[in-house]
Structures are given as structure tokens and as C-alpha cells.
Amino acid sequence: MKQYSGTQPGSRLFFIPWRTACSGSMFMLVFFMASQICYAQSATPGATLLKPIVITAPREEDSFSSRTKLESLPGGTSYIAAEEMPGAANLTASKAFFGTPGLIVQDFFGGNDQPRIQIRGSGLQQNPVERGILVLQNGLPINRADGSYIVGFINPRQAEAIEVYRGYMANRLSANVLGGALNFISPSGITSPNTRMMISGGSFGQLNLSGQAGATSGDFDGLIQADFNRRDGYRDYNDSRRFSVSGNAGWHLSEDVTTRLFASYTDLGFDVAGPLSKDQLKSSPRSVSAGPVVIPAGAIYPGPNVIRDQPERTASQFLVGSRTTLQFDRHILDLALGFTHTDDTFRFPVSSGIRETRGSDLTGVIRYTIESTDKNALPIFESAAYYTAGWADRKNYLNRSGTKGEHFGSNKLDATTLSLHANLNIPIHRNLTLTPAISYSRATRDNKDTYDSPTRPTLAYRPNDPTQLLPGGAVPYDSTRYKRSFDSWNPSLAMTFRPAAGQTLFTAISQSFEPPTHDDLLATVNGTPNSSAGRPNPANSALPAAVFVTPDLKAQTAMTLEGGWRGSHGIFTWDAVAYYAWIDNELLSLRDESGVSLGSVNADKTTHLGIELGLKAQLTEHLLARIAYTYQDFRFDNDPVRNNNQLAGAPPHFIQTQLQARIIGNLVMQAAVKWVPARIPVDNMNTLYVDPYAILDLRAEYRFNRNFTVFGETTNLFNKTYASSSLVVDQARSDQAVFLPGDGRAFFAGIKATF
């Protein structure tokens, strides 16, 4: 429900833009040409074990094989098949990952925008989260070469399955992050040789359209899919939309060689509704902040002026890649090549201004595996080499009441990442396997400041009348140029014990490494809710102050000890992992008590303790229960300022439960509860907290026949007013606007057709 808008009808935030249509047409042309020259490979691209497909293999066998591979690894992993994702009208990241232990998603604005996704706390304190996880699509990254990513590009609707690698397990995919990796596996013409369509909608102006078509012909197959969703949103300034189209084409060249080409295009746009104070959250959760209110004693309710600044983000990404798998006896070689082009415009509040980034990235991956003679055992040897290079142009402009103002920054950003990994799986007993591994990573971050003026402009508004501009100002130019490099050797050692079929116990010790991104190394500073970067006092236009900060950051490293037990017995299936990590130089993105960026810093020492528990029970033939519990205790370690405080933003307890019942025939009903039973610190000084909450959702699905299915959904059944997430700051005030309201009660319905 949009009341404040500086975007005119027909702009890319509300409608599919002309550029999107043109790019979609170009994509279709590329896909058609590719289908004539590029062909098939693994039915689960990106899996650790890479086997060529068997053309006649049914989807169920392939899915089981991929799940079994992950469950055999000595670390935290999950496999989420499309059938296990909830039948939601809008399948956001938080809904797709519902019930996945160790993976926490906290919604920001309710749609496909920028939820906080974190695994084991990596990237936790960024607003929005832009690093900490390697995100892959068919084994090829959507991350930029510096490790950053746009979370809104994640599209579970177009995934056949999702692989989750927690912690050091992601080293096998050449990740340079502490959290882990997510691999979104697309369907192919082999696994989905049919046509599917879906339409759904409901509360808050929600509309979703999707379609998919796949086919096979001899050794050839192909699939194309597209989806569009939009919503007005729960809050006053809360519009969002996303259009995605993707496809792949494959060819089984011989018994030993398969190859596949992938391509996708995503266009994303959403309003940044911003945070509220706790009083505003309770009294008017649909509202948006109008910035600080000046009273005789000073300013209260510090936070952004959303009504005036109209923050929003529009971004698009084109990805094209190929993967070829060659198998000769027990030797498997997998070759992948990917290219992405990303166009990102982020209109921040006035304190940071408008950031435009346009760049491209090229990625090459080689994986080599020697399989065991025992088909049920892990490969004897696994190795991977990953190299990505990226380049981008970034420009910064003043935010002049929601419009592009004067230009105040230009940079050319280059990044490279090299990752090498090798491990053995040594059977030292019939049920016991030793897995030593070594990884090497090197990353470079180069920034050339191309701004060509001796001063950088500033602007400000009157704090007691925030719609009135003060005289413009300027501060002296100071170069932001830097050239940084980071490298590390990261060993690990794991032991796996299989006491019975379908059960795996493991313990592991590992070292991890994560270098900073360009967003960590280059940040705007010295703004306020009523003035631009470089103007810490709105009334003083002549006060010299830095506009950017380029901190001399170190890469964060961790030593992690973990152990777990996965298995099943009778009606129960379980997955339990516990870990403890000692982290040096953890990267923290700090904000002050008004929410303005202070840039990134390295904490000295921190510790992360966690438990990741998943349990499933087939109570009867028609009744299935699931629960996922994640415990997180992330703390500073004798910090001179923050003592042993909790790191802000991490829920200590995160519980998700689901009960599914097949009532009669083809009618299936679900009840799902998300429960956060303990308060969550908003600031690192632990003075302000997000209150506990519990949310109940209900879903029902009825299948008329093999072709048509209808479904309905009620979310937040009891219309609970709560904060689904918050900004993360270093030192908060009790009246600060930091809380992000969750959606109120909503109703959705839709129909699916398969032919």
C-alpha cells in the first residue's frame, strides 16, 4: 500500500521494464542457439560427487542419490527437494528454508527483497547482508568476485532442489566464507519433461505467475521457466516485484561425456520501508519512519526519513554458463565456466546517498574425483580449483528527496579469488573413514578512485523542518584508492563412523578464511538522518569531514570443532550437529545510534557456539511432523569495550515446527509455527532487544486430478504484531528506529496445472 512515491508509473519498480523485455528476448535467442550446440550433464549440478546422468533414470532415484551423497559427508549438510518446500503463494527464501536446521532467515520487508540469511553467524551484522555465504546456481556463483551477493536474486521457485553446506563443508565448493554455501539446482528436460503453470495471489496486492516447459529427444533435452511476482506490501511504502527467466539445454554425447548450458536473467526492485522504533512498531506497524523528531531537549526517534528519502533498490543479473562432465572408469572430471553481468542501483537514505554499481564476473571451475570401488562409499580423492575475476564501475550520488543529486564518488573496483581444495577419504576400517583435507585461498581487492573534482558536494535538511534544504556544501577530495591481497592455507581433518546403514556419526576440526568485500573496504561515513556523507553537522556546510572510509581490514579466520549424528530408525529421521568456533578478526559492519554507517571493523576475538538439530517423524501413514531447532551463542571474547557481550542480530533460539496431515484422498493440510522464544540483541552493547514472538501459518492443498491442484494459505493467523528482524548497530538508544515489522495476517490462494 504505497502512499509515498518518487517513482513514476511505468518505472521499473512497478512494471517489467523495456530493458527486461529486450534482455528476455536476447535470452531466448541465446537459449535457442545453445540448444543446437550445448548439451547435458549431471542431473544435480554442483553436487560434490559428479556423475553423468542416466537418461532413463527417474527423478526419485536422482533425488535420493544427491541426498545420500550429502548425508555421507563429515559435516553439516541439508538437501531440500522441491516437494519438501511449503506450497506457498510466494515462495520466499524464508519459506523455502523453513525447517532447515542451522540456516536462519529473518525477513526484512516481507517479499523478495533483502532478508537476513546467515549460517553460523557469518555476515550477520551487515545491513543488508551481502556476504558470508557462497550462493550457487547449478554450481556457478551468483556472488560477485569479491564475495558479495544480492540476496533478492535467490529464487527457490525455479529450483528442483537446494543443497546446503554449512561451515567448512563449503570448502569442497571452493567457498571463501565462514558460513557455508547454498546451491540451487535447476530442473532439466529429463527431470521435468512436462509443462507446468501456476497463478496465485492474495493479501497486500500479492500476484504470482510462473510457467515451465521441458522436453527430451533422444540424447538431447531442454527446459525453460519464468516467473513474475509483485506485491504492494504490508506497510505504507513497501512495493516489490521480481521477474526471472532461466533455462538449460543438454546433450549426452557418449557414455562418458555429458554437457549442459545454463542461462538466466533476473530483474528485481523493491522499496526499502526501513525500521521503526519499538513504540512505533507497537502502535503503527504499517507506518514508515519520518526521521528524528526535534524537541527542546534534543532529537528523539533517531532513524532514516523514509518519507522524504524514498529508499529503494533495483537490480538485474544475467548469468550464462556451461558444465561438462567426463567419466573414465572411476575418474571423473568436471569443467565449468560461468559469466555474470550485474546492474545494481541502491537508493539509500540521505546519509549514504545513491550507489550505482555495474560490473561483470568470469568464473572457471575444475573438479576431479576418483571414486571408490564401493559405490556406497565416499570418493577416494576429491579436488577442485576455482578462479573468478570481476570488474565493476561504481558511482555515488546525493539523494535529493528521492531523486538523483550531485555526483560525489567514482571508483573502478576489481577483484579476483583463487581457491584450491583437495581431500582424501581413507577407509581405515569397514565402518570408519578418515578425511584429511587442505585448501588454499588467495583474494585481491583493487580500487581505483576515478573521481575528478577537487571537492565532494554535500547536502543537508533542517533537522526541525526536514523537508527544507539547507545551503549546499563541499568537502575536500581525499582519494579512496587501495590495493589489498589476502591469502590463507586452511587444513581440516574429519572422522566418519557408520554404525549401521543410513546412519553417520562424524567429528571434524577445520580452519576457515573469509576476506572482506569491496562493500567492507569502501563505505560512506559522517552522514546523519538529515545530511549526506561528509556532513556530520547539517548546519555547518564548511566543516571538513571524510565522505568515505577505507579501513585496513584483515581477513577473518576461524578454527572450528564440530561433531554430529545423522540417521533414521523406525518412524524417526534426525540430523544433529554441534560446533564451537574460535574466530579472529571477525568482520563487523557498524552503525551508530541513528542507524548511519560507521564502516566495517575487525573484532579482536569472538566465539561462536551452536547446535543445529532437525527431527522428522512419520507418526502415521497420513501424519508427518517436523521440527528444526537452532541454538546460537555468539560472543565477544574479553573485548575491551564490549566485554563478553552477545553479538547483535543472532537469535539465541530459533524453532520451526510443521505438522502435515493427509485428511481425505488428495487433501493435504499443514500447520507451521515459527517460534523465537528469547529476545535478540539489537546492539553489540546489549542494551536494546527484539522481543520474543511466535507465528502460526496454515496451508491446504487439494489435488483434483493429475493435472490440476488448488491451494490456500493463511499466514500469521493470530495477527501478531512483531519485529521479524532489526538493523544491527553497535550502540543503540531505547527510542531508536531499528525494528522491522513482520507482515500481519494475510490470505492467499492459487492454482497449479501440469500437462
Image (tube, rainbow, N blue to C red):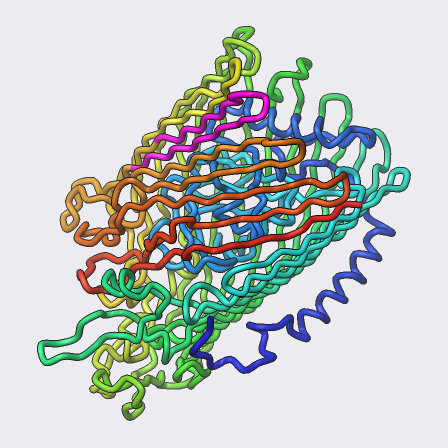
Q: Is residue 529 above or below residue 636?
A: below
- Does residue 621 show up magenta in the picture? yes
Tell me the residue at 76%/45% (across/down): 754
Tell me the residue at 67%/35% (across/down): 666
Task: Locate residue 262 relative to residue 180 in the image: left or right.
Answer: right
Location of residue 308 (image quadrant): bottom left
Task: Locate residue 110 relative to residue 358 in the image: left or right.
Answer: left
Tell me the residue at 66%/47% (across/down): 710
Image location of residue 6, percent across then percent down:
47, 81
On the rendered image, what quadrant is the C terminus found in?
top right
Q: Is the magenta stretch mostly helix, strand or loop?
A: strand
Location of residue 552 (image quadrant): bottom left
Of 520 and 399, nearer the camera is 399
Of 75 and 361, nearer the camera is 75
Task: Locate residue 511 relative to residue 707 in the image: left or right.
Answer: left
Image location of residue 696, percent across then percent down:
42, 44
Determine if residue 477 is in view.
yes
Range shown magenta: 611-632
Of 396 and 448, nearer the camera is 396
Image location of residue 739, percent across then percent down:
30, 59
Q: Is residue 322 above or below residue 29?
A: above
- Does residue 738 show up magenta in the picture? no
Tell me the residue at 57%/40% (across/down): 85
Q: Check the image and name the residue furthest to the right.
A: 218
Image location of residue 593, percent across then percent down:
22, 64
Q: Is residue 620 above or below residue 300?
A: above
Of 449 and 462, nearer the camera is 462
Q: Is residue 198 above or below residue 7?
A: above
**Count of marks placed on residues:** 0
Q: Check the image and name the residue furthest to the bottom.
A: 471
Q: Check the image and name the residue furthest to the top.
A: 430
